[in-house]
Image: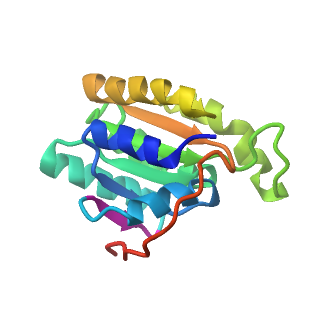
């Protein structure tokens, strides 16, 4: 498992304080942690493409790196802004993607997650998005390296979380900005 607070602190250490996305069961504990911090901005988006677009606008306004969270099935909705607007061949903007991996191989899940689960890593590779699957606290080093890569190369990277990877967090029920 990954200590959710340690993961949040890793993002904070890397000066990531803007978040947008569509809540997902794999990332629910992370969303709970976000709700405990008043010093950050967290927009719950109507869909994943909108979340990526909000992140793009944030970066263009501030030159800072946004973090966008979604379930892997939402990658399809985010494809246009990810591959057309911020790809390395067009505007080459940095972004941290947090992706909940429903339908991950070897994990029993609902049938509707099967195809998206099987193709997630291939899809990211085709989209030229470097990624890492995070399974435990030791993998936070991989996450840190990818975040630094995103900063240095102005690139998109994805950090992937299987179900029940993040530790439980008490939610303070702070309202997200909508």
Q: Position of residue 9 (x, y in %)?
A: 37, 43
Q: Decide: is 168 above or below 35.
A: above
- Pick whichever, 44 or 60, lies toward us: 44
Q: Is residue 61 left or right of residue 13?
A: left
Q: Is residue 128 visible?
A: no
x 75%, y 39%: residue: 118
**Is 143 on the left-hand or right-hand side of 28?**
left
Q: Residue at x 51, y 37 (%)?
A: 159
Identify the image's colour scheme: rainbow, by chain, secondary structure or one colour.
rainbow
Taking the magenta stretch, the answer to whether it contains residue 108 is no
Residue 104 sits in quarter? top right
Q: Quadrant of residue 105?
A: top right
Instruction: Depth check: give the residue in front, 126 or 170.
Output: 170
* 115 sits to left or right of 99: right
Residue 170 horizontal/vertical position (percent)? 51, 65
Q: Quadrant of the N terminus?
A: top right
- For the residue pair 131 and 16, the one nearer the viewer reads as 16
Q: Quadrant of the C terminus?
A: bottom left
Residue 95 percent coordinates (x, y): 35, 40
From the top left corner, tell me how far across and down residue 15 is, in percent: 24, 41
Q: How many marks?
A: 0
Most foreground residue, 35 or 59: 35
Q: Is residue 85 above or below residue 58?
A: above
- Decide if residue 103 is in sight here: yes
Q: Is residue 43 magenta?
A: yes
Magenta residues (range): 40-46
Q: Is residue 112 above or below residue 1?
A: below
Instruction: Give the residue drawn at x 59%, y 57%.
Output: 168
């Amino acid at each position: 498992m990954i200590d959710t607070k340690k993961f949040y602190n890793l993002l904070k250490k890397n000066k990531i304080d803007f978040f947008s996305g569509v809540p997902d069961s794999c990332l629910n504990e992370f969303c709970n942690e976000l709700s405990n911090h008043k010093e950050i901005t967290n927009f719950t988006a109507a869909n994943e493409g909108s979340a990526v677009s909000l992140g793009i606008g944030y970066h263009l306004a501030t030159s800072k790196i946004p973090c966008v969270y979604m379930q892997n099935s939402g990658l399809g909705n985010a494809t246009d802004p990810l591959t057309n607007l911020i790809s390395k061949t067009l505007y080459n903007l940095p972004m941290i993607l947090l992706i909940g991996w429903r339908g991950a191989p070897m994990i029993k899940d609902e049938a509707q997650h099967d195809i998206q689960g099987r193709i997630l890593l291939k899809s990211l590779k085709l989209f030229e998005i470097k990624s890492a699957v995070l399974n435990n606290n030791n993998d936070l080093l991989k996450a840190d390296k990818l975040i630094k890569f995103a900063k240095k190369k102005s690139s998109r990277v994805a950090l992937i979380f299987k179900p029940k990877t993040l530790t439980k967090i008490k939610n303070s029920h702070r309202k997200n900005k909508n």
